[in-house]
Structures are given as structure tokens and as C-alpha cells.
Image (tube, coloured by chain):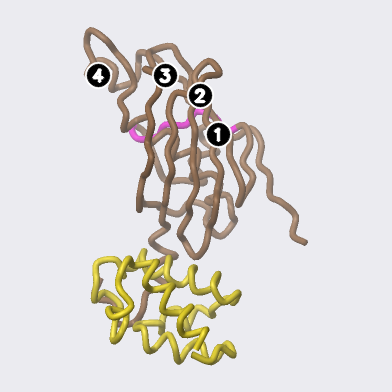
Chain colours: A brown, B yellow
Amino acid sequence: MTEELILKNLDAYEIQQYQQNRYPCFFVDFIEEAIAGKSAKGYKNFTYNEWFFPAHFEDEPNVPGFVQIETLTQVFLMTFLTFPENKGKKTGFVSVKNANFKKKIIPGERMDIEATLASYRRGLAQGKATGYVKGEIACRIELVIAIPDIMKEFRPKSSKE
Amino acid sequence: MVNLEKYTNVFVSTFSITEEQTKGLKYQDIEAWDSVGHMGLIAAIEDAFSIMLEPDDIVDFSSFEKGRDILKKYNMEL
């Protein structure tokens, strides 16, 4: 039986060793725990200094839906980019399903994210992530994410891509 | 014969096609069988037959018929 790889308390710099998202598209402040092949927990603090708040919206600043999706996703990435062979690889969306947005997130709030990996095989990861604000569900999604560099190794020879 | 039915059903359910459409079907003949669909198909076949395909076989798995030949290597008579 192989031992679980558990990572604790990764700061923003350390998280960026595992994934290639960078400012202004980097949306995780801290990973409290990541269990490779299983789950990840982390959070993002949204302050008014975020680049999107003045534009979304001037008189009613709140976190855009696409930022919520990206934040959930970036924590989810830590469930499989923490496999040593995947560390630092680029990823891409395959699908986002059942996206639910339950709560408006405003400047000063922190979103806690819990992500679980349902399956990972040959560069294709499936799972879900849920965001909480003050203990209440704010948003959740089901995801399929690819690591193109790995997937292309398994494409049939007749590939036209 | 049971295995062939199971094999065909994997294509039917993975790509949402009819049994008739599986005949002669090749990689990228339909939109659903792209590089992502290929990974889904292989995973579904592995689950259905409780096997793990070798990387070379996954790359060679370029058509419905080719897949039948490949599965023979895993002692699956289709």
C-alpha cells in the first residue's frame, strides 16, 4: 500500500510551484492541506484592492462569477498537481458543470474552499469544489480538468489535432 | 458475444451514438471522439473489463475495430 502524500500550510509562493497561474489570474492565498489524489482545502481573501472590484461594480463591488470559478478550480488543481510527476504542469478546462452561485461575495470576505478529486487518469482529473463564506455555501462546481502535456502522449496516431 | 455487446455498449454510452454508428467508427470521425473523449472511452473500457491498457495500446486504439484486436491481447475475445 502506498503512503498518502499530504502537504500542509502552503503559502502563495509555494502554491505557485505546483501550478502556473500567476497574478492577475492567481486566486489562492493559502492551502491548508492538500492530499495528492484525494482532496485540498484552502482559502482566498478578497480585499477591495482586487483589480476587478472597481469594475464589478463601481457602486456595488462583488466577486465576479468567473473569479469564483477560477478560485474553486485553483484549489481543485492542488488535488492532482501535487502528484510529483504533475508538479508545475499547465492545465486546461475540459468542462464545468452544475455551477451554483448562492451568495454575493463582497470586499473584506474570505472564501474557504474544499475540493475533492473523484478520479484522475492519464492527465484527466474529475471532481468538485465548494466555496464557503462565513461557514455558508457561496458557490460550487463540478469540474473536468486536463493536463494537455500528459494527455497528448495518449492520443491515437491518426490524430488530426 | 457477451464481451462484444459490453464493448459496443461502452462506445454507445460514452459517445451517445447508436450501435449502428459504432461500425467502422474511427478516432475523430465524430465530435465526441476527440482527445478528451478518447480518455473517457479508454477509462470506460478499463472499468467495463477490469483491465489496465498499456500506453502503446491506448495510442493504437484508433478505431472500433482496432480496439477489438487490442483487447484480444488482454484475453478478451470479442
Query: What x and y, as percent, mark residue A63?
Result: 34, 21
Helix or strand or loop: what does disc 1 sit on?
strand
Residue B42 in the figure: left or right of residue A49: right
Q: Gap in Å between the C-alphas at discs 1 and 2?
A: 8 Å
The disc numbered 3 marks a residue on which chain? A
The disc numbered 2 marks a residue on which chain? A
- Judge depth for marks 1 and 3 and give the one in front: 1
The foreground one among A42 and A138 is A138
Q: Do the residues labelled 1 and 3 touch (CB within 8 Å)?
A: no
Helix or strand or loop: what does disc 2 sit on?
strand
Please identify the quadrant where the C terminus of chain A is shown: bottom left
Query: What x and y, as percent, mark residue B33?
Result: 31, 70
Task: Give the residue at mark 2.
Answer: A132
The disc numbered 4 marks a residue on which chain? A
The foreground one among B10 and A161 is B10
Read off the magenta span: A24-31
Residue A28 counted in the magenta span:
yes
Q: Gap in Å between the C-alphas at discs 4 and 1?
A: 25 Å
Helix or strand or loop: what does disc 4 sit on?
loop
Q: Do the residues labelled 1 and 2 touch (CB within 8 Å)?
A: yes
Task: Give the residue at mark 3.
Answer: A46
Q: Gap in Å between the C-alphas at discs 2 and 4?
A: 20 Å
Q: Residue at x 35, y 82 (%)?
A: B62
Q: Which numbered disc flags the more N-terminal residue, 1 or 2?
A: 1
Q: Which numbered disc flags the more N-terminal residue, 4 or 3?
A: 3
Q: Do labels 2 and 4 share a chain?
A: yes
Task: Give the residue at mark 1.
Answer: A114
Q: Which numbered disc flags the more N-terminal residue, 2 or 4?
A: 4
Residue A65 counted in the magenta span:
no
Three-letter residue code for mark 4: His
